[in-house]
Amino acid sequence: MNRRDFMITAGAAAAATMLNAHQTANAGEFTGKIKKAVKYGMIKEGTTPLEKLQVLKELGFDGVEPNYKEVDMAELAKASEATGVVVHGIVKGWSFDEIDLCIDEAKTIGATSVLIVAGKVDENMPYARNYTETMEKMKQAGDHAASREIHLLVENVWNNFLLSPLEMARYIDEIGNPWVGAYFDVGNLVRNGWPEHWIPILGKRIVKLDIKEFSTQKMNDEGLWKGFDVEIGEGTIDWGAVRRELALLDFQGWATAEVGGGDKNRLADIAARMDRVLDL
């Protein structure tokens, strides 16, 4: 090796060392453990699935999660393959209608989960009846999900149901299917609870996370729904405590922002906020 080749090789090695050191110095506790995503409807930049996923790729997002029938899944799958941005799940939401078709679609596009809400309790739907009826639907859909190796995940939402972590854990356990678990929304329970209390109780039942913020002060001062009108990291949630419990759980998986979306600058801000609160 001549002197010139030696200097080039040495310079490249030094640059690689510096890059690795920089990456290590900037690696957070959950770097490589938590994958960062957004809901598809949050992406207001671009017109096609490919353009939208290219934006996510540029901003460092790992994945995306659409609603059922929100977008042409075949086109989204092609965009995912082209960009490397993973379609990690599908949100089915509040209805069990076509749940088996949704599970099949998740399998076809390479997703790993379907998010479902376990009914709603109101003046016309008694609590006990909702418990038994939705559990039967969960068992049936869960059997199909298991056959397709897709996680069917119940989310904690404002449906007047599964109001404590103990009850949610019991509900999932009584379904008795390892492919049925929890899609844990960190912000949804803050009006009457603390995420760090739920995480150790739900434990390994938690498969994926929804990320949003909530302010109990804004809720008290301006009204219940105004509690969500706050940016990630600027509300009531003790993210340090959340991270501590996730670390004890050795959580590894997807965390998807579910907040107001926007253009590239807005999505970049969301990415930065997720990096800070999740230590990515």
Image (tube, rainbow, N blue to C red):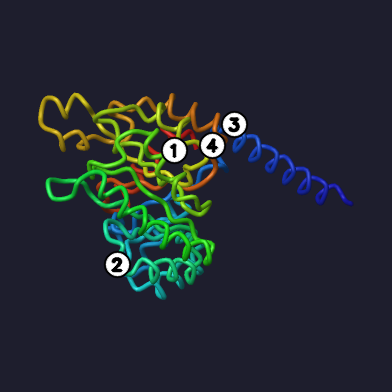
Question: Hey, what amino acid is under mark 3?
Answer: Ala
Name the mark nearer the viewer: 1 or 2. 2
N-terminal of the two: label 4 or label 2? Answer: 4
N-terminal of the two: label 1 or label 4? Answer: 4
Question: Hey, what amino acid is under mark 2?
Answer: Asp
N-terminal of the two: label 3 or label 2? Answer: 3
Q: Looking at the rendered structure, which numbered label has been put on residue 30?
A: 4
Question: Hey, what amino acid is under mark 1?
Answer: Asp
Q: Name the residue under label 2.
A: 97
Instruction: Name the secondary structure under disc 3.
Output: helix
Q: Name the residue under label 1.
A: 275
Q: Badge 2: how crowded within 10 Å, few (<14), some, or many (20+)?
A: few
Report the front residue among 55 and 243.
Answer: 243
Q: Is residue 135 left or right of residue 15?
A: left
Q: Quadrant of residue 193?
A: top left
Q: Name the residue under label 3.
A: 25
What is the spatial separation of the Cα atoms under label 4 and label 2, in whole angstroms? 36 Å
The reply to whether discs 4 and 2 touch (Cβ–Cβ < 8 Å) is no
N-terminal of the two: label 4 or label 3? Answer: 3
What is the spatial separation of the Cα atoms under label 4 and label 3, in whole angstroms? 13 Å
Report the front residue among 91 and 179.
Answer: 179
Report the front residue among 54 and 86.
Answer: 86
Going 23% across and 49% down the picture, which residue do you hit?
120
The reply to whether discs 4 and 3 touch (Cβ–Cβ < 8 Å) is no
